[in-house]
Structures are given as C-alpha cells and as structure tokens.
Amino acid sequence: MSAPHRGCGKANGMDGNNETWPKLIGAALVLAILALIGGYLGWLHPIGDSLAVGRGMAALAVLFLAVMASFAGLRMAAFGSLLLAMVTGGQVLLAYNWPGPPGSYLVYQKNMLYRNGDLASLAADIRATSPEIVTLQEVSEPNLALLAELEKDFPNQHVCKGGRVGGTAVLTRLATVADTGFCAPGMAAIQVAGGGNRFWVVSVHLQWPWPYRQAGHVELILPVLDKLQGPAILAGDFNMVRWANSVKRLADILGVRPAGPTVGTFFGFSQWFRLPIDHVFASGSGRVAPRGAQGSDHLGLLAEVEL
C-alpha cells in the first residue's frame, strides 16, 4: 500500500506545477499589457508619457508572453494579446523606419551638452552640412564660443538664456522678421523669411518627464505657441518620444508633423541604449538623418523639411 501512496503524492505535485505556470504567465501578461496601455494615457496623468518611452519594449514583452500563454493553454488571451502587440509595436516600428518626404529647407538640430569639449568639431560639421537653420539647446556660457565662431555663416542669431545647463538658440542665414524674436522657459522662437515663405522657427528644450516637471513645462509653453500664426518649424530636445502625449500636444497646437524616421539620439545612459528624444517637426513634415555626437551626449539631426 505504501508504493501507490508515494506515486499519488508525485502526481499531485506535477498537477500543482502544471497549474502554477499558466497563472504566472497570465499574471506577467496582464502586467505587460497594463504597462503598454498605460503608455497611451499621458492625457490622464504624466506617468503615461513616461511609460510611452518604453512602448516598443512593452509591445515586445506582450508578444513574447502571448506566445508563452498559447503554449500554456491560455489561447484566447494569447490571441488578443498578440493582436495588441502587433498593432502597437507596428506603430513604433514604422516610426523608426518610415522616411519622410524631402523638403526645401535644411535644419541642423543639436543639444550641444553644456560642457561640450569639442566645439570645433561641431562647428565643422554644421558648416559641412550647410543648413539654412540651426536649432541649439544647452547653450551655456562656454558654448557661446560656437555661436561666435559661426557668426559669419549664420549672421542672424537669436539666443535665450537658461539655467544651469544653458539656454536655447536659433541660428539662420535667412532673413529674420524684425521684432519677432522672443524667449519663453526652455524655448527660443523667431520668424524668418526665405524661399518665398515667412515662418516661425522654434528651438525647445523640455524638462525631464514624470516624476520630473515636463508636464508643467508643457502647460506653460502651450499658450505661447498657440499665439504663433502661420507655418512653423519646431525642433529640439524634447526629453520624450515623439508619440507621447506631451510632444503631440506641442506639435498639434503649431500644426506641425514629425520629420521621419525617428532616431535614437540620447546615449547618456549607455552607448548601446539610445533614446529617441530629439525631434524636428515642420508644417509639411520632412526627412531626417542622424549626425555625430561632436562632444555631446546627444547625436545631432539633419532634417529636410517642407512648409
């Protein structure tokens, strides 16, 4: 009688393990789905924008766990989760790979890094690309040397001072409209004229997202952008992915669209993990390509945009 008793105990243990794995996979799948969906709720709470940064990784996690769930017998949950991962992940994949149309204006966008030690290389790269417009962030006192170096190439310069890491600036070889340049927190804007068009150029540097103060910063500058009439180019370090609510609100109020594809520009955490937080927008969209770091922890962007 003892032998059957031992066999019965082993069978019960196996049944317990068979029940545990589907529960664990199901719980992990629910958490991944919540993280993915939460990234669309930036309009409800700023934490949604912070979650939006990891939308691609969350979609991959849901995809992987959906496959695991199908093997664990959770077929209905796996099917719905697979569709969710494919739709949301596909949007991110398109953003990284879909090029925008070519444009008439060349824009060089760069977060300089307030302690940039290679200004000569940055100046050479800007000259080599020969843009009509340059938008800069982290324009600290030492970095003003770059603006002085480029004054002959870009005689019209609008600089707005900032805090510890410096301010923002717009440099252009195009004519500027008198008395249109102004500053706002983390923003420099001026109206320019060229190619038969008159349009606004805005250089922006947003604060970090939740739990930092990006949401409040956006609320502060939205009314300022709302007063700008006509075509516009909006470029800068947004400290946020372009599909997040905070960035979309800024773009929508100006009526601008992103130049594509999105590019991983910030490598301050790791050379192997680059966040796509620098962007160029224009009324007629455009095409963008990365430039080198040139002494910064951000890659530069060179965009052809249309109005």
Image (tube, rainbow, N blue to C red):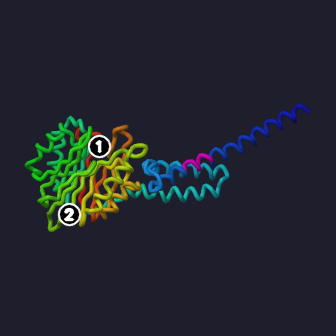
Residue type marked 2: Phe
Dot label at residue 68: none
Tag 1 secondary structure:
loop
Dot label at residue 298: 1
Residue 41's spot in the image, x, y percent?
48, 55
* Residue neighbourhood size for the residue with mark 2, other residues' Cα within 10 Å, grouped as few (<14), some (14–19), many (≥20): many
Q: Nearer the viewer, mark 1 or mark 2?
A: 2
Q: Residue at x 46, y 52 (%)?
A: 45
Q: Is residue 229 placed above or below 54 in the rendered structure?
A: below
- The residue to which callout 2 is attached is 199
Q: Nearer the viewer, residue 50 or 183?
A: 183
115 left or right, relative to 81: left
The reply to whether residue 131 is in sight is yes
174 left or right, relative to 228: left
Q: For residue 252, which quarter of the picture?
A: bottom left
Residue 56's spot in the image, x, y percent?
45, 51
Q: For residue 20, which quarter of the picture?
A: top right
Residue 263's spot in the image, x, y percent?
33, 50
Q: For residue 93, which quarter of the picture?
A: bottom left
Residue 231's spot in the image, x, y percent?
24, 65
Residue sticking out furthest to the top: 2
Tag 2 secondary structure:
strand
179 left or right, relative to 206: left
> Which contiguous range is marked in magenta?
27-32
Q: Give yes or no for residue 134 being in the magenta stretch.
A: no
Q: Residue at x 60, y 49 (%)?
A: 68
Q: Nearer the viewer, residue 138 or 282?
A: 138
Per the picture, the main secondary structure of the magenta-coloured stretch is helix
Q: CA distance from mark 1 to mark 2?
A: 27 Å
Residue type marked 1: His
